[in-house]
Amino acid sequence: AQRVTQPEKLLSVFKGAPVELKCNYSYSGSPELFWYVQYSRQRLQLLLRHISRESIKGFTADLNKGETSFHLKKPFAQEEDSAMYYCALRGSSNTGKLIFGQGTTLQVKP
Amino acid sequence: DAGVIQSPRHEVTEMGQEVTLRCKPISGHDYLFWYRQTMMRGLELLIYFNNNVPIDDSGMPEDRFSAKMPNASFSTLKIQPSEPRDSAVYFCASDSNSGNTIYFGEGSWLTVV
């Protein structure tokens, strides 16, 4: 079964502190992993995906198949990073379906 | 393209009433998804379509929920009769066959009182 787990519902840090949003997944094949961000009362939008190996808004995420993790990291948090972050998985069968974790609210305090 | 368009943006209805949520996917996209977002359960996939055909409806909570996609540019999610526990944000999303990412609408905020 496909499953995405985000163990923290809320992560609160001060501006300038490092951030790590945890994501673990369960999937027997080779998944695609994504991070989506939702700013207050707005639509979800793609932040990054593991295939691209890119850095967006200072965020990076590395797929660790051994630990089945895809943690999202940023070295120095900014207040504008405050949002809900969702980790998502798509199976290798490429049915298009994305399975989301429960989300983590990131609160960056001044 | 204007993106995925959902209506209504906000709806408040009384328990027992029928609710219909509408979605227009991005032109040319083959996949359409309906998700429900709540504080307790996060983002749940309710149902998705490929080329207007329902592929997986295992996430639909119960028979009160139904979804249709009569053509490539329109889908509805219907709740009949509605209950207070259906209060949530319902997102529609679409994706092309390339599978690069899915694009979300702005959501329909449903409150059942």
Image: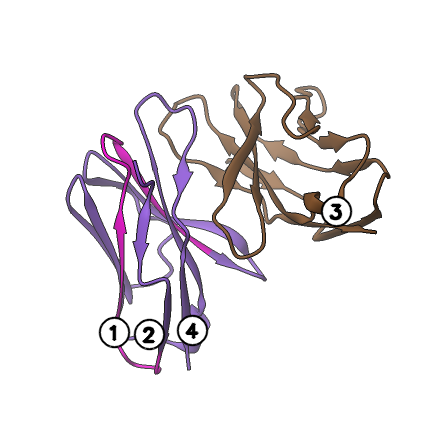
Which residue corresponds to the image point at 69% horizontal and 43% vertical from the top-left? A81
Q: In the rendered image, which residue does mark 4 sit on?
A: B111
Which chain is disc 3 placed on? A
Say what secondary structure mark 2 lies in: loop
Check if mark 2's residue and mark 3's residue have beta carbons within 8 Å. no
Visual hue assigned to chain B? purple
Quadrant assignment, res B112: bottom left
Which chain is disc 2 placed on? B
Which residue corresponds to the image point at 83% horizontal and 44% vertical from the top-left? A15
Marks 4 and 1, how far apart in space?
Answer: 12 Å
Magenta-colored stretch includes residue A97: no
Tag 4: amino acid? Thr
Marks 2 and 3, how far apart in space?
Answer: 39 Å
Q: Are marks 1 and 3 on the same chain?
A: no
Please, is residue A55 above or below residue B78 in the view?
above
Say what secondary structure mark 4 lies in: strand
Tag 3: amino acid? Glu
Q: In the rendered image, which residue does mark 3 sit on?
A: A79
The stretch of residues the image draws in magenta is: B13-36
Q: In the rendered image, which residue does mark 1 sit on?
A: B18
Q: Upstream in the sequence, badge 2 or badge 1? A: 1
